[in-house]
């Protein structure tokens, strides 16, 4: 079984600043993948970034990067130089199609 | 780009009605999924299918059924809608066949269903 936990329901960040969204997980798998998805007000969910558990290097996609701590089962998303368009719900997900509860990120101009 | 289309953006139904939610994808994906999204609960998997006429129960299948007669279309059926099925329903697809856990999901825009 796999569980994904996002304990913060909401966060706020000033435009151009950096914010980190937290996620922890638990799994019995030895090899797995972890994902962050973004759901803007349009409701169209899109993939932000993906991490392969057997890779030690943290994944990076432009302003988005992860801090993957395998031993601690932690998978946080860092957004650098936050933009107004980053305001959305963010979901952490892993393995067997399991999603966290999501976090609402607001960006202050 | 992959397009996953859900037939209705908003839907209002009465308790006891039979409800069909339709989902179509245009990229020949093998796998299709139905989730419901509720505030504070995130996304929960209802059913998924990895091939035509195949279906597997997810975490919360009670009160729902599905149909996949063609590869591109995956329907969610509420046999007798109840108020606790008021929710946002999201359809998704992925490739390749089988529930590969490394493949990203492509989502539709969701159907907000209200059961009165």
Image (cartoon, helix red, strand yellow):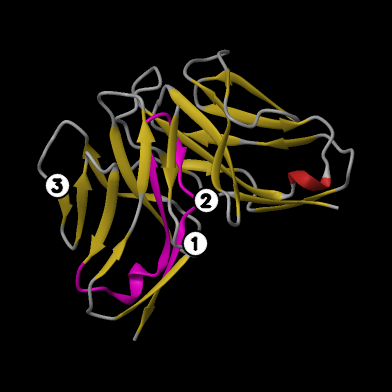
Residue that sits furthest to the left in the current view: A57
| Gap in angstroms between the C-alphas marked 2 and 3 | 30 Å
Residue that sits furthest to the bottom in the current view: A109
Give x and y (percent) for residue B5: 52, 42
| Gap in angstroms between the C-alphas marked 1 and 3 | 29 Å
Q: Which residue is drawn at 38% across and 18% down?
A: B97
- Closer to the chain start, of discs 1 and 3, is 1
Disc marking residue A58: 3
Label 1 close to label 2 by CB (< 8 Å): yes
- Residue B91 drawn above or below residue A23: above
**Magenta segment includes B41:** no
Relative to residue B61, is residue A52 drawn left or right?
Answer: left
Towards the viewer: B35 or A5: A5
Q: Mark 2 lies on which chain?
A: B
Relative to residue A47, is residue A89 drawn left or right?
Answer: right
Disc marking residue A42: 1
| First to last magenta residue range | A80-105
Residue identifier under label 2: B109
| Same chain, labels 1 and 2 | no
Q: Which residue is drawn at 34% across and 23% down?
A: B100
Q: Nearer the viewer, mark 2 or mark 3?
A: 3
Q: Which chain carries label 3?
A: A
Label 3 crowd bin: few (<14), some (14–19), many (20+), radius 10 Å: some
Give x and y (percent) for residue A81: 20, 73
Quadrant where the N terminus of chain B sits is top left
| Same chain, labels 1 and 3 | yes
| Same chain, labels 2 and 3 | no
- Residue A79 drawn above or below residue B113: below
């Amino acid at each position: 079984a796999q569980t994904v936990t996002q304990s913060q329901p909401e966060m706020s960040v000033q435009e151009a600043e950096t914010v980190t969204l937290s996620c922890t997980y638990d799994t019995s798998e030895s090899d797995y993948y972890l994902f962050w998805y973004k759901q803007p007000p349009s409701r169209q969910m899109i993939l932000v970034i993906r991490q392969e558990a057997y890779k030690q290097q943290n994944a990076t996609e432009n302003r988005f990067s992860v801090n993957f701590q395998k031993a601690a089962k932690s998978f946080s998303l860092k957004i650098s130089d936050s933009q107004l368009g980053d305001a959305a719900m963010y979901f952490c997900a892993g393995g067997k199609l399991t999603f966290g509860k999501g976090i609402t990120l607001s960006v202050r101009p | 780009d992959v397009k996953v289309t859900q037939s209705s953006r908003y839907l209002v139904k009465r308790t006891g009605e039979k409800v069909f939610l339709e989902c179509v994808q245009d990229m020949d994906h093998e796998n299709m999924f139905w989730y419901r999204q509720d505030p504070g609960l995130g996304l929960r998997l209802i059913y998924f299918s990895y091939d035509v006429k195949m279906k597997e129960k997810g975490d919360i299948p009670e009160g729902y059924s599905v149909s996949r007669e063609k590869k591109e279309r995956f329907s969610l059926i509420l046999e007798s809608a109840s108020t606790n099925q008021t929710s946002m329903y999201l359809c998704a697809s992925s490739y390749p066949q089988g529930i590969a856990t490394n493949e990203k999901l492509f989502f539709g825009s969701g159907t907000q269903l209200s059961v009165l």
